[in-house]
Image (cartoon, rainbow, N blue to C red):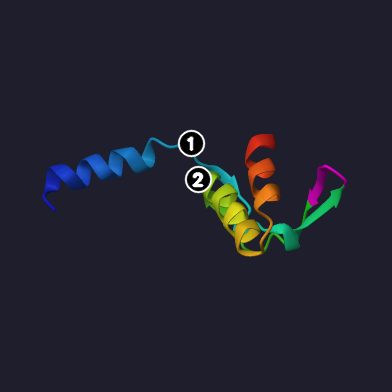
Amino acid sequence: MNCGSLKIARDRHFDRKRGPRRGLLDSHNMLCNPGDITAVVNWEDSGYGDPGVDVAYCRMELFLEGMNDAADEFLLDG
């Protein structure tokens, strides 16, 4: 990879919205009422970065647990 490619990759990465993120967000760390997430608990893995990582991780966990419909709803409701 040449220096120009590295600069493009770096710029694309840092152009993303960054902010607080939960880290390892999954259904085991959420308190819910039917159809609604009411709280997110266990913030020891939190940090600063792309919050889209939390969305991707949670959807992956839902799919791996066999909850495909919930994974799709999670994305649509977000």
Q: Neighbour class for label 1 at 10 Å: few (<14), some, many (≥20)?
A: few
Magenta-colored span: 34-39
What amino acid is at disc 1?
Answer: Lys
Task: Judge from the rendering whether residue 61 lies leftward or rightward of residue 12; answer left or right.
Answer: right
Place of residue 1 in the rendered image (x, y in percent of width and height, measured from the top left): 13, 53
Tag 1 secondary structure: loop
Q: Is residue 56 visible?
A: yes
Where is mark 2, residue-wise?
A: 50
Would you place residue 58 above or below residue 16 in this image? below
Could you tell me residue 77's position as x and y percent? 69, 36
Q: Residue at x 66, y 64 (%)?
A: 65
**Residue type at the position of mark 2:** Asp
The image's mark for residue 69 is: none
Task: Indicate the position of residue 11 as horizontal and vertical percent values.
Answer: 30, 38
Between disc 2 and disc 1, whose residue precedes?
1
* Label 2: few (<14), some (14–19) or many (≥20) C-alpha neighbours in 10 Å: some
- Main secondary structure found in the magenta portion: strand
Q: Residue furthest right?
A: 33
State the image coordinates of residue 42 (x, y, percent, origin top left): 73, 62
Image quarter for residue 45?
A: bottom right
**Are dots 2 and 1 in contact, CB under 8 Å?**
yes
Name the residue carrying label 1: 17
- Quadrant containing the C terminus is top right
Q: Quadrant of residue 16?
A: top left
Residue appearing at x 32%, y 38% in the figure: 12
Residue at 36%, 43% (x, y): give it: 13
| 41 versus 16 height, above or below | below
Q: Is residue 74 above or below residue 66?
A: above
Q: Is residue 37 magenta?
A: yes
Cα separation between marks 2 and 1: 6 Å
At 62% from the left and 60% from the top, the residue drawn is 61
Q: Nearer the viewer, residue 51 or 43?
A: 51
